[in-house]
Structures are given as structure tokens and as C-alpha cells.
Image: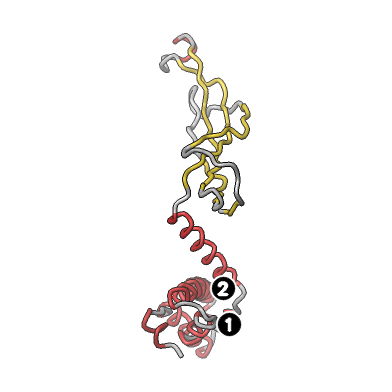
Amino acid sequence: MTMETATKPIKENHKEVLNSKKEVWTPKVGYSVEPVQPVIRSVELDRGNMQKHIIYDITKHIYKTVKNSETKGENGRKYDHTKITQEKETHILKMVDINNYEKEKLLTSIDNEVSKVDLTTIKSNEDILDFACSEPVSNTERMRRAVALCKVVNKKLEEKWFEEKKRRKTLDKKEQNELNRERNFAQRCKITTEDIARYR
């Protein structure tokens, strides 16, 4: 989702064809091809004119009427070609759209931060709280930062546990205890709103 600058106002639910092309597909069964749902390519927010532009691909299969002898009784229809059209649809931009955009941008930014964290340094809930509360932001955003890091920690430690389990017979007792400790932390890795509020 992106933001645009002001453009010429367009009426609500206005549709515009950007481009169109024709293709011939190979039917898998008989004379029919699988239907394709519309695919959204991008969503652009124009705050200057309070408009939301949705660009998507429409795939429509074209059939022609033929004699029943050609279609072997399949309702006299035979696939001819496929028309793929890219369209832009314009809607009135609402505050919920802007709020969703800002939230999506924030979550993407948090995910980028989490991806740079050295997970070997995350060994307790306190470490997660340190990351979540390292920025002067609201408690709501701190909670989102904690949740994002917890998800990554859980996934990585679970993957490590199953990988190490395959060669568990070659691990000594100390290594097995450390592995179990990490997995137990992954299973208990959870931050609450109370944890965030009490953090100093």
C-alpha cells in the first residue's frame, strides 16, 4: 500500500481500464478452464483528494457456442480464449483506510527491526521487554514490538529443538539440558500488557 499526492478528483466507484491482453490457455478437462479470482496488485491512498485507488487483474474466459457434436454434450460451449484486464477502481478514502495504512506501515517497520535482532541474546522475557521498551513509544506499540519478537523467537527455537532432537543421541547431558531449557523458554515466551506497564 502506498500514498499518493493530490490528483484530479474522481467520482466514487469510478473504474478505469489500464491495459488488456488476450491469451489462449489449455483446458485441463474437456472444454473448460479453471476460473480465476480477481488479483489485487496494489492499493494507493491519495490523501490530497481523499481517494483510494485499487489496481487489480481481472481474468475472464471467453467461450463460443458450437454444435453439440463438437462439445460431446457439454452444453454447446467451447473455450475460445482468455482476456486479462488490469483495472483501477477508485473509492472515497475513509479514516479506517488511513488508520489501517499507518498500522501496516508500523508493523512492517517493527518486523524489519526484529529481523536485525541477534536471537542468541534473547534468553528470557526480560530480554524481550528490553527490546520492546527500548524506544520512547506508546505501550500499545511496545506490546506490538514484544509480540513480533516473541513470534520469531518461538519459531526459531522450535526449529532448533526439532533439528537437535534428530541427533539427540549424540548430545551429552549438559547439551540436552540446555536444549530443553531453550525449548521451555520458547513455549513460555509471552509478554502481557501488565509486563509492559510495569517495565522500568
Q: What type is the residue that disc 2 sits on?
A: Val
Residue 99 is situated, as x and y percent measured from the top left of the image, at: 46, 60
- Label 2's element? helix
Dot 2 corresponds to which residue? 114
The x and y percentages for residue 68 are 44, 10
Depth check: give the residue in front, 34 or 70. 34
Vertical side of 64 occupied by 193: above or below: below
Q: From this viewpoint, which residue is outermost toward the left?
A: 194
For the point 63% across and 29% down, the residue is 21
First in sequence: mark 1 or mark 2? 2
Looking at the image, is mark 1 or mark 2 nearer the viewer? 2
Spot occupied by residue 136 in the image (x, y as percentages of width and height):
52, 81
66 shown above or below 160: above
Q: Position of residue 77 (x, y in %)?
A: 46, 17
Task: Give the Cα separation between the discs numbered 1 and 2.
Answer: 13 Å
- Rendered residue at 50%/36% (across/down): 14
State the residue in front, 56 or 117: 56
Name the mark on residue 20: none
Determine crowd level at label 2: few under 14, some 14-19, many 20+ residues with C-alpha closer than 10 A: many
The tag on residue 120 is: 1
Q: Residue at x 49, y 63 (%)?
A: 103
Q: How is the image coloured?
A: secondary structure
In the image: residue 114, left or right of residue 199: right
Which residue is pictured at 48% across the width and 57% down the height?
Answer: 98
Q: Nearer the viewer, residue 166 or 34?
A: 34
